[in-house]
Amino acid sequence: MVVKLRNVSVMGAQIGISVSKGTDVDFDGGFIQAIKCGIEERDEPSLMSMIGLPADTPPDALLLALMILRGRNNADRDESERILKTSKIGAYLRNCTDLSTVVSNLTNLANSPQGQQLIIWLQSLAG
């Protein structure tokens, strides 16, 4: 992603400009007088937050959820949600802002080639 700023002028903010990691920033003008940081490059979002899960969701709970959903892409969303709520990830689902989206994300991920690679990687972490 590219952020283009022309004749930039930022004053008095805690952070002048904040962009996600890997963003190309194209300046033309100048003058940033921020209190804490002129330009901040944020960390990439975590895997859990990209799925919609709380950041403190343990990897083994994600692994179990993906394994439960693997091959169940035709299952009713309500049934998948019910099954997930009774699994280890259930406690973390309670803290999701959009449970329906998270269940869909998990189901789609579990049944994708990338999901299979993620399962293998999570299994290697578990030992």
Image (cartoon, helix red, strand yellow):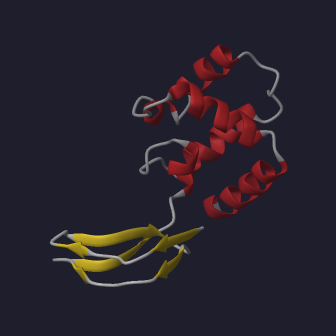
**Residue at 26%, 79% in the rendered image:** 37
Query: In this view of the protein, can residue 86 be seen by the observer?
Result: no
Q: Is residue 73 above or below residue 33?
A: above
Instruction: Give the camera-side residue of 66 and 97.
Output: 97
Q: Is residue 31 above or below residue 63?
A: below
Image spot of residue 22 (x, y percent):
56, 75
Instruction: Give the camera-side residue of 39 and 31.
Output: 31
Q: Is residue 64 above or below residue 79?
A: below
Task: Please tell me how many numbered marks the rendered image carries.
Answer: 0
Image spot of residue 92 (x, y percent):
45, 36
In which image quadrant can residue 31 be found? Answer: bottom left
**Residue at 80%, 28% in the rendered image:** 73
Relative side of 30 to 94, left or right: left
Image spot of residue 23 (x, y percent):
54, 73
**Residue at 50%, 49% in the rendered image:** 49
Instruction: Give the camera-side residue of 41 and 108.
Output: 41
Query: In this view of the protein, can residue 101 be seen by the observer?
Result: yes
Q: Quadrant of the N terminus?
A: bottom right
Relative side of 34 to 49, left or right: left
Instruction: Give the camera-side residue of 33 and 77.
Output: 33
In which image quadrant can residue 108 be found? Answer: top right
Image spot of residue 29 (x, y percent):
38, 84
Q: Quadrant of the C terminus?
A: bottom right
Relative side of 108 to 34, left or right: right
